[in-house]
Structure formats: structure tokens, C-alpha cells
Amino acid sequence: MFHTHREKDGLVWRVEPLCKVLAGEYGVQISESGYYAFKSRGKSDRQLMDENLCDKIERVFRENYQCYGARKVWKSLLNEGEHIAKTILIA
């Protein structure tokens, strides 16, 4: 019933023991059904928007010979009509 998760060196982990360790050692309550619900969910609108923005930032950076810093990338995107917070680029 439980899916297995295999690491590179061949160790196999089931979801149930992982949830128990997270609850016991770290106080994080995650049920097996919650894990599977998370895994089957698609990307959120915010994740899609962030990926799109990262692609635009990387494009501007590459087009300018990878010499632009955060401020110039931000100003370049503003000139293209992309209104983003400058703090996103710095973080």
C-alpha cells in the first residue's frame, strides 16, 4: 500500500515510518494521506508565476552577458513593462 522511496545508495523508505519520525523528533504532524494529497497536487498559481518570473530574470541576465546585477535586471524588467518588487531579485 505504501509507496517506497529509494535513495541513490539503495536504501528504501516507506511513507509511514517517515511520518512517525517527523512527528516524534520534529513535532511535525503529517499523515500518510496528507503526504499523498500533497504529492498528487499540481503546482499552485504562485509557483507558476514565480517560475515564469525566474525565466524572465535569467533571460535578461543572459542577454546582457551575465554582467547585470540585481538593480539593472530589475530596471530592465521595468522597461519591458514587468512590474516586480526589487526585493525579489535580491533575496
Image: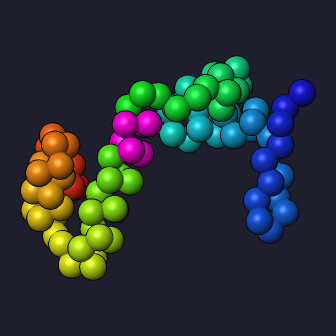
The magenta stretch is: 47-52
Location of residue 69 (image quadrant): bottom left
- Main SS, magenta region, reads helix
Task: In the rendered view, tell whether residue 68 sits above or below residue 33.
Answer: below
Residue drawn 32% across the image and 71% down it: 62
Q: How many marks?
A: 0
Task: In the rendered view, tell whether residue 91 sits above or below residue 53.
Answer: below
Farthest residue, direction front = 80
Q: Position of residue 71 (x, y in %)?
A: 10, 62
Nearest the viewer among 50 and 35 is: 50
Task: In the rendered view, tell whether residue 37 sits above or below residue 24.
Answer: above
Q: Position of residue 23 (x, y in %)?
A: 58, 32
The C terminus lies in quadrant: bottom left
Residue 31 visible in the snapshot: no
Q: Position of residue 51 (x, y in %)?
A: 41, 45
Task: In the rendered view, tell whether residue 75 sits above or below residue 15.
Answer: below
In the rendered image, residue 49 lying in the magenta stretch gets the answer yes
Residue drawn 51% across the image and 39% down it: 26
- Colour scheme in the image? rainbow
Farthest residue, direction right = 1
The N terminus lies in quadrant: top right
Residue drawn 34% across the image and 62% down it: 58
Residue 53 visible in the snapshot: yes
Residue drawn 21% across the image and 55% down it: 89
The reply, left or right, for residue 75 in relation to residue 51 is left
